[in-house]
Structures are given as structure tokens and as C-alpha cells.
Image (cartoon, helix red, strand yellow):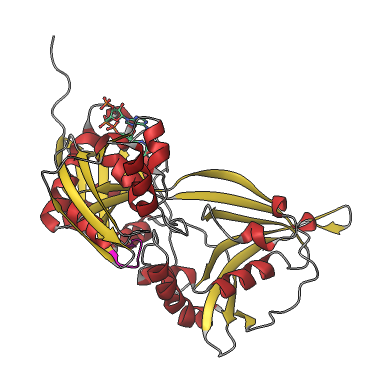
């Protein structure tokens, strides 16, 4: 039988590939190629396509798969930051699916990560079933809320007893929000740093050629000393029915560098006149919102699930960069069929820091690399993972000790897609 499929070539992107690579990206994400502002879209994408981190699969001249990564600065428990390879724009054109193109691109990227010295890779998975096979595990989770304002029983809203709230224009917002976010992200593990382009898009300084950014309201929270400690960005669908206001307030971004700021911004969001429902997406699973309401059930969780996936590459580096709930030692045996993170490691860690190095000691826990990704930011329980056979422990006591070490008081949260 004649072979009708010439080999598909996977290679790193060059500037000459840009238009064809972007076309394949649109096809993979089910977007018709933009006609009116085609040039603007190409130009916009040039900003973030780094040739050293971008590859394509080519069937002759035709690009049939895309893959891209960006350095992302991730905060880990204890406040240290690590540069991760943030994998994104993964597509394989439907005509070329399930022939191993993603697997080939991922293997190349992970090799490059090791060469670049990145201790981990992260991504937002489009579907749950794709990335576990490459050693990624779900490391943070999210919930979406819908608040029935009339049931919330918030009591009559009064301005904050401490500090103040101000509605500001985008220029004023842009002067303060980046600094607040810097303080916030260094205090909350799972958060990634926002690049300058984020703020340019939010403030309208830069217009995204594919997304219609809604005009938004921006609120700043200042504490008693006048320092800006939090911000809220929202838009409202102003609806009326039966001669009554039925507005829906969509929280786009609500970030507090302090708990007071976060609480005051939530209280404000559920108290705007004419608003019957508040919708907030991709919030942390332990968001304080329900606790602020007289009736916590009025904040209904409309979705919940995994968000950031994490692939360990350099285990000693990862484990020694975070802190732990209590001071203890553990020997972890990590299995990795791709070879990057394979080994037995002695972790000696506590609230003030940790060391981790290869060892020949008998293991307390044996686990796959993706399961370590699951545990790393503190969102999972070793006891729960052992219950389904994903961790093998030397004894129950080791499992409980590991649980107390790895879990964190606040759960990790990654508010942003990339
Ligand atoms: C970080 C991000 O960018 S997330 C966005 C991911 N992209 C998308 O979802 C866009 C639409 N989908 C696609 O473009 C493609 O189907 C991809 C990228 C998900 C998969 O590409 P393919 O080249 O078909 O994957 P490949 O052939 O390498 O598959 C490798 C394995 O993953 C499995 N797999 C691939 N896609 C899926 C999926 N969506 N769900 C479950 N398993 C999957 C395959 O069955 C195969 O399994 P095997 O190793 O046991 O045989």
C-alpha cells in the first residue's frame, strides 16, 4: 500500500513563518481567520511570539500545529518566586490530530526547559485528559460564584469604617493597580506576575485586536494612611424586569493586598444599587466571599475545577524553594517515565526554609511526577491521593506527616490565564 502521508516536520518558528503560524493557531482554536483587521492581529501577536519558545509542525508549506511558551514568574508557598515555562497556544489542526504531534512538541519543549534551567512547566489545560501523560498534575483550583444579592442578607451597606473606596478612571487605575498586584502576588502562592501588557490592555492604552474589551468601572481601596491596598474592575449588564432592576455585575478582577481591602471590595460589589446578581469567575476555592454574607448560601458555586497544571522538572530545586507547615524530613521517590524528575530525594523542610538532595535512603512516599505537581503548591492532601493509589507510603504516619508539611493555610490561587 502506498503511504500518502509525508512526514510532518516539527521545527522552531522563524519570523518568515509568522502569518502561517498564526493562521494555524486560529484554526486550532476554532477561529475563522480575521479578515478586516488581519494585519493588526499579526502585528499584535508579534509582541509575544518569542522565536526561541515557539514551534510549529509543517506538512509541506502548511502549518498544522502550534506550540508556544512564555516565562512566567510563579509564587510558591513561603513567598519565593520561580521562573516557570508557561506553555500555551497548543493546537493541532483537526486533519492532523492523534498522530502524536502534541507528544513530539511537548517532548521538545521539556528538553528546552531543562536546557534553559527552568525547574518546572505550567499551563492552563483546555481539557482534563490531555496533559497528565506528560507529567503535569493539577496544582490549583478555581470556583465561579453567582451571588443572589437579595438573599445575601448583607445588611445595609455603609462606607468602610477604615479606609475609603474611589471610582477612578483608567489612567488613575493604571498608576496604582500594578503595585498593589505586586504586593498581592508575593503574598499568595499560585499567583503569576502580570506583565506590562496586561495593564496596557486593561487601561485601554493598548487595544486587543481580537477581543472586545468592555468599558469597565475601576474601584480603588485606600487604607487609613491613604495607601492603595486593593482594586476592583467590573462591568454591569443593566437589566430591568417587571418594573424592577435586575442588573448583573460581573467582577473582572478583585485583588486585595490585605484582607481588609479584599473584604471591603467584596462588600462594595454586592451592594451596588440596581444589581440583583453578582457573577465572579475563577476565584480561589477558599474565597472569603461567602463568609462576608449574612447568608453564605446566596453565593452559589456555579463551577469548580482544576486550573493551573504543574510539571516538576528539577525536584531538589522545587522542593527546597518552598516552605512547609511543620519542620520534618521525608524521603520521596519520584517516578517519571520521561526521565526529567526521576529519583529519590531527601527533603528537610519547615516554616523557615528547606533543603532537598538526592539520597539512597528508603522512601517514605513513592509517587509519579504528576502527583508531585498535584501536591507542590499545597492544594492536595497526601492522604486523599493515597486513598486512590496515587501515593504509596511506607506507613500511615509518614503519610500524615507529609500531609501536614505540604498543605498550606490558604489554598493556592492562580487568578490569570496565559
Ligand atoms: C496549554 C494549552 O494551550 S491548552 C489548549 C489545547 N488545545 C486544544 O484543546 C485545541 C483543540 N485540540 C487540539 O488542538 C489537539 O486535539 C490537542 C493539541 C489537544 C492534541 O493534539 P494531538 O496531536 O491530537 O495529540 P497526540 O496525537 O500527540 O496525542 C497524544 C495522546 O494524548 C491523547 N489526547 C490528545 N488529545 C486529548 C484530549 N483532548 N483528551 C484526552 N486525550 C487526548 C491522545 O489520545 C494520545 O494518547 P496516547 O498517547 O495514549 O495514544
Q: Position of residue 87 (x, y in %)?
A: 29, 50
Number of numbered labels in the structure image: 0
Q: Residue at x 26, y 44 (%)?
A: 66
Q: Position of residue 244 (x, y in %)?
A: 86, 58
Q: Position of residue 160 (x, y in %)?
A: 68, 79
Given the current orientation, which residue lies at the most extreme bottom position? Answer: 225
* Image quarter in which the N terminus is found: top left
* Image quarter in which the C terminus is found: bottom left
Q: Residue at x 31, y 51 (%)?
A: 122
**Magenta extent:** 74-81
Dividing the picture into quarters, in which one does residue 199 lie?
bottom left
Give the side of residue 230 with respect to residue 38, left or right.
right
Residue closer to the observer: 238 or 253: 253
- Residue 152 lies, with reference to residue 1, above or below; the image says below
Dividing the picture into quarters, in which one does residue 352 lie?
bottom left
Q: Position of residue 86 (x, y in %)?
A: 29, 54
Residue 333 inside the magenta-drawn segment: no
Dividing the picture into quarters, in which one does residue 350 lie?
bottom left
Q: Residue at x 44, y 67 (%)?
A: 207
Q: Main secondary structure of the magenta part?
A: loop
Amino acid at each position: 500500500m502506498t503511504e500518502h502521508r509525508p512526514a510532518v516536520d516539527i521545527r522552531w518558528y522563524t519570523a518568515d513563518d509568522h502569518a502561517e503560524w498564526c493562521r494555524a493557531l486560529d484554526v486550532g482554536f476554532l477561529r475563522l481567520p480575521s479578515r478586516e483587521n488581519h494585519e493588526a492581529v499579526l502585528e499584535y501577536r508579534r509582541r509575544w511570539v518569542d522565536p526561541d519558545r515557539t514551534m510549529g509542525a509543517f506538512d509541506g508549506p502548511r502549518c498544522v500545529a502550534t506550540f508556544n511558551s512564555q516565562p512566567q514568574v510563579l509564587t510558591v508557598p513561603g513567598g519565593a518566586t520561580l521562573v516557570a515555562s508557561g506553555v500555551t497556544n497548543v493546537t493541532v489542526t483537526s486533519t492532523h490530530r492523534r498522530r502524536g504531534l502534541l507528544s513530539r512538541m511537548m517532548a521538545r519543549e521539556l528538553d528546552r526547559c531543562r536546557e534553559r534551567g527552568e525547574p518546572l512547566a505550567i499551563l492552563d489545560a483546555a481539557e482534563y485528559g490531555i496533559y497528565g501523560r506528560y507529567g503535569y498534575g493539577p496544582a490549583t483550583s478555581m470556583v465561579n460564584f453567582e451571588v443572589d444579592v437579595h438573599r445575601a442578607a448583607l445588611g445595609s451597606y455603609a462606607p468602610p469604617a477604615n479606609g475609603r473606596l474611589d471610582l477612578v478612571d483608567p489612567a488613575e487605575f493604571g498608576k496604582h493597580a500594578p503595585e498593589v498586584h505586586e504586593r498581592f502576588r508575593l503574598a499568595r502562592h499560585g499567583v503569576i506576575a502580570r506583565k506590562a501588557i496586561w495593564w496596557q490592555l486593561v487601561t485601554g492604552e493598548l487595544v486587543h485586536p481580537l477581543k472586545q474589551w468592555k468599558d469597565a468601572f475601576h474601584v480603588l481601596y485606600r487604607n487609613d494612611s491613604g495607601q492603595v491596598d486593593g482594586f476592583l474592575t467590573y462591568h454591569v449588564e443593566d437589566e430591568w424586569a417587571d418594573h424592577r432592576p435586575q442588573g448583573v455585575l460581573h467582577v473582572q478582577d478583585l485583588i486585595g493586598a490585605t484582607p481588609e481591602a479584599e473584604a471591603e471590595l467584596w462588600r462594595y460589589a454586592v451592594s451596588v444599587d440596581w444589581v440583583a446578581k453578582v457573577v465572579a469567575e475563577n476565584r480561589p476555592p477558599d474565597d472569603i466571599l461567602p463568609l462576608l454574607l449574612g447568608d453564605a448560601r446566596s453565593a452559589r458555586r456555579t463551577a469548580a475545577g482544576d486550573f493551573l497544571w504543574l510539571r516538576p522538572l528539577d525536584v531538589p530545586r522545587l522542593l527546597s524553594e518552598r516552605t512547609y507547615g511543620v519542620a520534618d524530613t521525608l524521603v520521596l521517590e519520584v517516578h517519571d517515565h520521561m526521565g526529567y524528575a526521576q529519583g529519590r530525594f531527601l527533603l528537610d523542610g519547615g516554616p523557615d526554609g528547606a533543603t532537598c538532595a538526592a539520597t539512597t535512603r528508603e522512601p517514605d512516599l513513592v509517587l509519579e511526577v504528576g502527583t508531585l505537581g498535584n501536591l507542590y503548591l499545597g492544594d492536595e492532601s497526601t492522604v486523599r491521593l493515597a486513598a486512590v493509589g496515587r501515593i504509596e507510603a511506607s506507613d500511615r504516619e509518614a503519610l500524615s506527616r507529609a500531609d501536614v508539611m505540604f498543605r498550606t493555610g490558604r489554598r493556592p490561587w492562580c487568578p490569570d490565564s496565559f
